[in-house]
Every structure is written in C-alpha cells, then in structure tokens.
Image (cartoon, rainbow, N blue to C red):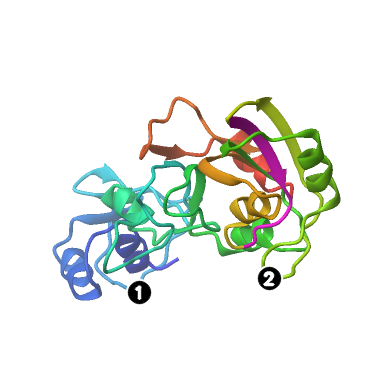
Amino acid sequence: MRIDKLLANRGYGSRKEVKKLLKSGVVKVNGETIKDASAHFKPDEDTVTIHGETIEYKEFIYLMLNKPPGVISATEDNMHETVIDLLEVDDALFNPFPVGRLDKDTEGLLLITNDGGLSHQLLSPKKHVPKTYFAVIEGEVTEEDITAFKEGVVLDDGYKTMPAELVILKQGLTSDIEVTIMEGKFHQVKRMFEAVGKRVIYLKRLSMGELHLDETLELGEYRELTDEELSLLKKH
C-alpha cells in the first residue's frame, strides 16, 4: 500500500499536504524516514510512525448506532442532520454510509460502514436477512393480525409482503408489539399495519440479522462492532 494513501486515510490532509508532511521527514516506516509519497509499505507487517506516534491502518470501519428520531439515514443532506453528522471526525474520515434506512422518526439499530460488500450482502433481497422492531400501535392488535402477518399482507401499492412474525407484548387502546420482517420495503412496518387498519405511533429497530442493539447506547451514541458481532453479521 502507498504511504500517501495511509496518511490521507487517517486524515493528514490533501495529497499536497501529505507530500509536504513526508518531505518534512517526520514519517518513518520501521524506523526509516520516508519522503517519497509513492513508497509502499505492508499494513500487516510494517510499523508507520509520525513524530514517533504509531499510525494504525484500517480499511473498513463497522459502527453500531442507536439512531435518534429526527435524523435521516443518509450521508449528506442540505436540510436535515444525517447519521453521518453524528460521527466523530476520525470515524467520518472513512467515508462510511448507513446500511439500509430507518425512517426519520424511527429509532434504534443502524449499522454504518464503508464495507460495500457486507452492505450488499445484508440488503440483498435474496438473502432475506431478518429485521426485528419494537412498535407501539394505535389500536388493539389481535390474533387475526398475527395470522395476517404470518400469511403476508397486501400493501397500498398492491405488493404482498413475505410472511412476518408478529408478537403481542401488550394489548389495549395502544398495543406494544415486536415484529420481524424479512424484507426492507419503503416504510414497510408502518404500511403493513396500515394494511390491517392500524397505525404505528412509535418504532424502534432492535436487531438486524444476528446483530442486536446495544441497549447501553443512548440515542445518538455509537460504538465499533466487536469481532464476535462482525463475525455473526458476515454469516449471512
């Protein structure tokens, strides 16, 4: 790998600024001063330092965000705050993006990464990666709704969903439920309940595949995935 790519990856400036940094003689590989921007090093074997401080190289970043309401699942937007705006500068440098979308008013688990291969794997319709949500529903959710979801419901555009698992946690004027879907259609959970004459008034994603929301994360907080979590995700 080229040394200038590493320095740019870690936020040491533009190509011009990186060349200037190298020429100043503060960059070393295995203790040897490197001034040539095109010089190569081996990320898994060589040690790169700047002013004596070791610089670590990571190709990919994997972040679990507890998405707050009011923030949109996009990399940039002129009108609204995005999930990328919530990241520290060091993490944003990797140019990550959200894997799929959560509605602006929906909370919960959102994976953010720059690994396009994993993102495609998780979002591919052929993979049927399950996604589980907690929701508060206006109206009483019934056994008939469980049956309807299990058979698949017809949305407002005529599309019939794949079977979904609906679990009633609390019944009443409002009902608490958990629902697991195998697709990711636009506003799918909300539209599924509209199809059975009910309205979602609160929605939170709890899991995606084997990745479960870390409930210790406050809204708007995030952390890197553990090796175990990443391994489970990559099984899909």
Contact, CB < 8 Å: mark 1 with mark 2?
no
| Residue at (68, 70) in percent of width and height | 157
Q: Tell me, yes or no, whether the highlighted magenta stretch contains residue 180.
A: yes
Q: Is 48 in front, or is 201?
A: 201
Quadrant assignment, res 185: bottom right
Residue 103 percent coordinates (x, y): 48, 54
Q: Amino acid at mark 1?
A: Ser
Front disc: 1 or 2? 2
Q: Is residue 89 left or right of residue 203?
A: left
Q: Quadrant of the N terminus?
A: bottom left
| Residue at (17, 64) in percent of width and height | 21
Q: Which residues are magenta?
A: 174-185
Q: CA distance from mark 1 to mark 2?
A: 54 Å
Q: Is residue 175 visible?
A: yes
| Residue at (30, 54) in percent of width and height | 85
Q: Which residue is mark 2?
A: 157
Q: Is residue 31 visible?
A: no
Quadrant assignment, res 230: top right
Q: Is residue 64 above or below residue 70?
A: above
Looking at the rendered structure, the secondary structure element under dot 1 is loop
Q: Which residue is mark 1?
A: 38
Main SS class of the magenta portion in the image: strand
Residue 158 percent coordinates (x, y): 74, 70
Q: Is residue 151 left or right of residue 199?
A: right
- Tally the numbered discs: 2
Looking at the rendered structure, the secondary structure element under dot 2 is loop
> Which is more N-terminal, label 2 or label 1?
1
